[in-house]
Amino acid sequence: QVQLVESGGGLVQAGGSLRLSCTGSGSRFRVITMSWYRQAPGKQRELVASITSSGTTNYADSATGRFTISRDIPKNTVYLQMNSLKPEDTAVYYCNARVYESGWRRDAWGQGTQVTVSL
């Protein structure tokens, strides 16, 4: 059905910036929410940021003030701008889309993109 592809991860030094992108494709769908999650080795997957269809954003405490989530609806793309990166931000970042697809509510996940922040 809906396929999500993330890009933009990589290796950066502490204090640097990255912009993650997630592009959806596939059948017709209507987005309810778009979110970014991350998972570090040995830790639970956690919500980093989300944006609703109305544009309301939500951030984890660790991301507030440093990360910004946004989306370009015509391009079916959501972004996560990450500034002032810290080593503790190191994780695999996953894009999530909660959508209505052919009348059904579905969750789609991207393959993940690695973000590594060195000291």
Image (cartoon, rainbow, N blue to C red):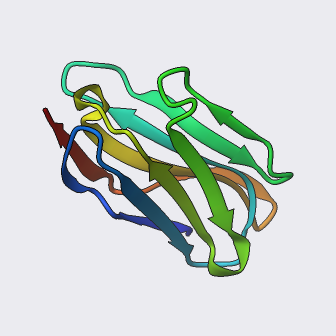
Could you say where residue 36 lies in the image, as x and y percent from the top left? Answer: 50, 44
Q: Nearer the viewer, residue 104 or 30?
A: 30
Q: Give the residue at the far right of this rendering.
A: 54
Could you say where residue 107 lies in the image, as x and y percent from the top left? Answer: 59, 49
Q: Nearer the viewer, residue 102 or 80?
A: 80
Q: Residue at x 55, y 25 (%)?
A: 60
Could you say where residue 56 lies in the image, as x and y percent from the top left? Answer: 80, 43
Q: Residue at x 48, y 53 (%)?
A: 81
Could you say which quadrant of the image residue 21 lies in? Answer: bottom left
- Image quarter in which the C terminus is found: top left
Q: Residue at x 23, y 49 (%)?
A: 114
Q: Is residue 109 above or below residue 74?
A: above
Badge count: 0
On the picture, is 109 further left or further right than 8? right
On the picture, is 33 further left or further right than 90? right
On the picture, is 87 further left or further right than 106? left
Could you say which quadrant of the image residue 45 lies in? Answer: top left
Q: Is residue 108 above or below residue 71?
A: above
Could you say where residue 105 lies in the image, as x and y percent from the top left? Answer: 73, 51
Q: Is residue 117 above or below residue 28?
A: above
On the picture, is 5 further left or further right than 16? right
